[in-house]
Amino acid sequence: MSNARVLVVDDEADIRSLIKDILSDEGYSVTVAGDAASARKEVADRKFDLVLLDIWMPDTDGITLLREWSEGGDLKCPVVI
């Protein structure tokens, strides 16, 4: 079993739920965020080993969010878009 922490960022609840269920079954600790604002809060509050990031979200797109994290030095883990 893995203790790795994964953040799943996607505006579609079904996708978030499916990915969370699959990764949780494999032993990962999964946190979900439905928008960029929630993702920002999660990254500020805890450390993740991996972020799965949606590109197209209504409030802020994934590329912009990744750029914010990169420029701010806020994220110290791989990101899969």
Image (cartoon, rainbow, N blue to C red):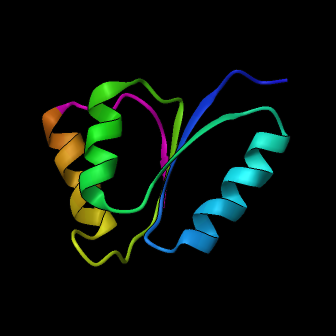
Residue, x 53% and y 29% (percent of image)?
Answer: 49
Residue 80: percent from left, percent from top: 52, 54
Residue 33 located within the stretch drawn in magenta: no
Quadrant housing residue 45: top left
Q: Nearer the viewer, residue 58 or 68?
A: 58
Residue 26: percent from left, percent from top: 84, 39
What's the magenta bit mostly, secondary-structure-wise? loop
Task: Give the magenta range.
Answer: 73-81
Residue 29: percent from left, percent from top: 65, 32
Q: Is residue 72 left or right of residue 28?
A: left
Q: Is residue 52 left or right of residue 41?
A: right
Q: Is residue 81 left or right of residue 16?
A: left
Mark count:
0
Residue 71: percent from left, percent from top: 14, 41
Q: Is residue 44 above or below residue 65?
A: above
Q: Is residue 13 above or below residue 41?
A: below
Residue, x 24% and y 54% (percent of image)?
Answer: 37
Q: Quadrant of the N terminus?
A: top right
Q: Is residue 76 left or right of residue 72?
A: right
Residue, x 34% and y 75% (percent of image)?
Answer: 57
Residue 76 located within the stretch drawn in magenta: yes
Residue, x 38% and y 24% (percent of image)?
Answer: 46
